């Protein structure tokens, strides 16, 4: 695992249920021990800023790409 720190802004696009997707993202961030700031969320997109170990930020992206069962992620933008 990398010791390098990373910061990223993610926008997940698709069919979102904001409460479910936000709770899912917060839970994954806690499990991965990364910092998270919740941004905007609507029926089509959810935005988060995260900070933590590089590999763990990558793992967050992967986990949220799969999303909770009531959301469908079609695209992820990372900056």
Image (cartoon, rainbow, N blue to C red):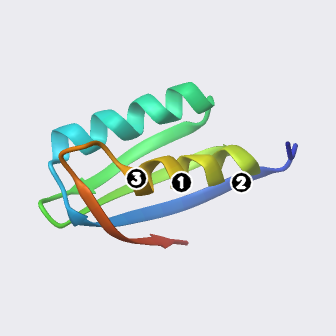
Q: Quick one: 54 or 7, which is closer to the camera?
A: 54
Is 33 on the left-hand or right-hand side of 20?
right
Q: Is residue 66 above or below residue 12?
A: above
Residue tagged 3: 66
Location of residue 37 in the rendering, given as x and y in whole percent from the top left corner: 43, 44
Q: Are marks 3 and 1 in contact (CB under 8 Å)?
A: yes
Front disc: 3 or 2: 3
Residue tagged 1: 62
Residue tagged 2: 6
Residue shown at the point (48%, 53%) measured from the top left: 49
Residue shown at the point (14%, 59%) measured from the top left: 42
Location of residue 47 in the rendering, given as x and y in whole percent from the top left corner: 35, 58
Residue shown at the point (18%, 56%) measured from the top left: 16
Q: Quadrant of the C terminus?
A: bottom right
Separation of marks 3 and 1 at Cα, in angstroms = 7 Å
**Rendered image: mark on residue 48:** none
At mark 1, the secondary structure is helix
Is 58 on the left-hand or right-hand side of 15?
right
Q: Quick one: 65 or 46, which is closer to the camera?
A: 65
Separation of marks 3 and 2 at Cα, in angstroms = 21 Å
């Amino acid at each position: 695992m990398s010791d390098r720190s990373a910061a990223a802004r993610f926008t997940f696009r698709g069919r979102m249920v904001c409460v479910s997707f936000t709770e899912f993202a917060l839970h994954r961030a806690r499990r991965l021990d990364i910092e998270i700031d919740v941004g905007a969320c609507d029926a089509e997109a959810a935005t988060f800023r995260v900070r933590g170990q590089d590999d763990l930020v990558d793992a967050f992206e992967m986990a949220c790409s799969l999303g909770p069962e009531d959301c469908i992620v079609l695209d992820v933008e990372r900056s």
